[in-house]
Image: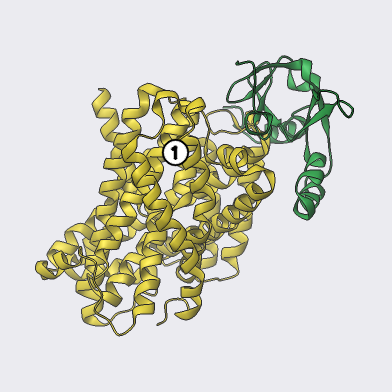
Chain colours: A green, B yellow
Amino acid sequence: MSDSIDLGLRVVDRQLLDSEERRCGKVDDLALEGGPGEALEVIAILSGPDVWRARAGLVGRLAAWVGRGGRIRIPWKDVAEIDVNVRLSKRAQDLGLGHGDDRLRPFIAKIPDADR
Amino acid sequence: MKIFQVALGILAAIGGFVDIGDLVFNVSAGATFGYQLLWVVVIGVVGIIVYSEMCGRVAAISGKAVFDAVRERLGFKVGLMALVSAQVVNLMTLTAEIGGVAICLQLLSGLPYRSLIVIAGIAIAIVVWVTSFDWIERIFGYGGLCLLVFAVAAVKLDPIWSQVGHGFVPGMQTQNPTLYAYFVIGLLGAALTPYEVYFYSSGGVEEQWGPKDLGLNKANAMIGYGLGGFLSLALMIVGGSLFLVKGIEPEFLGSIALGAEVPLGQIGLLLAIVGILFAVSGAAIDTLFSGAYNLAQFLGWEWGRYRAQTGAPRFTVTWLVLLVLALGAVMTGVDPVQLTEFAVIFSAVALPLTYIPILLVANDRSYMREYVNGRLANTLGLIYLLVIVVVALAAVPLLVLTNVGQG
């Protein structure tokens, strides 16, 4: 990784991969910290339908409503690497990500032959 | 062995090229304007080659499928609009293809249409659930090769070849330039089918393509789609030398099959129906998956058909839901041929929203390294950007002005 990175182009809207290469959401927004006159610091990645509310006006609010809320905060220290994806250093479950897939899995598993 | 496998892949691509949109638009274009619009097919086929080669290359080098790129380059808001429009068109196409499957089954069996819709839906679900991806591609791709009967039919109908030749030179001899323009848009829309590209690029990511697969990607795009386009030409020639001459309007899928029966008899008819059946079934499956790929890629869900269904639960649920929605829509009795026309025209409207992000990513050196678009890819890429934007802007006005191609 180079010293500087364009957060808007290289981080926001990128795919999140957990430590086991599982796709577990997108970088929906970033949480920045720093008062007036201070340098801004990225402190967390925000992911989940609730984050869309602030990003896309009416469309975002509608999408957030359809997606039924949910906002996950991933501390910036848990980011392992940024290449074409944003790679995390922990497992999705431990960060609160990938709930949607985990919730549905038992139902899908009941259908014969679903594990092939 | 390697070459053999590549050849098999290309054969599948040829058989998989034609879908209900190509069948409807190419035959009706021939039935309305004879061979005059053959040049449009060439432009459309080169367009799909350019677009899919770029998507395949992006998939191979960056591991990104189309809707990953859309989300990244257009952001959430505009990207969401691209997603919604793609999904609406996708569902319309899926509905039309399933309707087409049921029609073919009806022609073959004589059973009632509605029960065949249910049978078609269940069959598609089972095939998708138990068959591996490679086999799906092969079964339907090779089955679709039966459509080559239309190429034989085109020759057998003995068209005036000098007139056919003239069709490759743009020109217009008609009292109805608006209808002519409508068909130009429709033929381009039918050739540049976006779901094929979503499916193709996602497949590349699933098969974990890398730089070594770029040759395969080029071959698939150029030879597979190129020869697939040859089938589109054959369909239009059949339309021009049979339907136009006899004054038949190919309003039903069954009448398209007549194009092979008249010159070749029963066996021609049978091959045509079986070919159409495989082509639209394969297209239905591609469309079904494209819808699930798009949503999962946009939202960052786990996706893929190479993993078990339990490996990507939301992806699985998405295609199941799409299948049920489409089956419900076919059950309303909507006419698949009419719906196809709308689906093709609206897909042309939405095309720039997915084409532009791919063009941008294919030029991004930080992703693509030495595999960024070269001069040829960019020249063609920009020319087609212009074509696609013009087509998108003209599509709906022409749809209205011609009363959905009624003239």
What residue appears at the point 73 percent right and 17 percent down from the top-left corner? A91
State which chain disc 1 sits on: B
Of the pair B238 and B261, the residue shown nearer to us: B238
Q: Position of residue A101 (x, y in %)?
A: 72, 32
Q: Quadrant of residue B204?
A: top left
Judging by the rendered image, the residue that carries numbered circle 1 is B55
> Tag 1: Cα neighbours inside 10 Å, few (<14), some, or many (≥20)?
many
B336 displayed left or right of B328 = left
What residue appears at the point 45 percent right and 58 percent down from the top-left corner? B101
Q: Position of residue A98 (x, y in %)?
A: 74, 29
- Count of numbered badges drawn on the protein: 1
B237 displayed left or right of A34 = left
Q: Quadrant of residue B25?
A: bottom left
Which quadrant of the rendered structure holds the N terminus of chain B?
top left
Of the pair B219 and B20, the residue shown nearer to us: B219
Please tell me whether residue B318 is drawn above or below residue B166 in the rendered image.
above
Q: Position of residue B399 (x, y in %)?
A: 48, 74
What residue appears at the point 49 percent right and 30 percent down from the top-left corner? B205
Please tell me whether residue A112 is drawn above or below residue B350 in the rendered image.
above
Please tell me whether residue B10 is drawn above or below residue B160 in the rendered image.
above
Which quadrant of the rendered structure holds the C terminus of chain B?
bottom left
B35 displayed left or right of B180 = left
Residue B336 visible in the current orientation:
no
Instruction: For mark 1, give the secondary structure.
Output: helix
Q: Amino acid at mark 1?
A: Cys
Of the pair B224 and B311, the residue shown nearer to us: B224
Residue occupying the far bottom of the picture: B175
Q: Position of residue B221 (x, y in %)?
A: 33, 40
Of the pair B230 and B251, the residue shown nearer to us: B230
Residue A23 visible in the current orientation:
yes
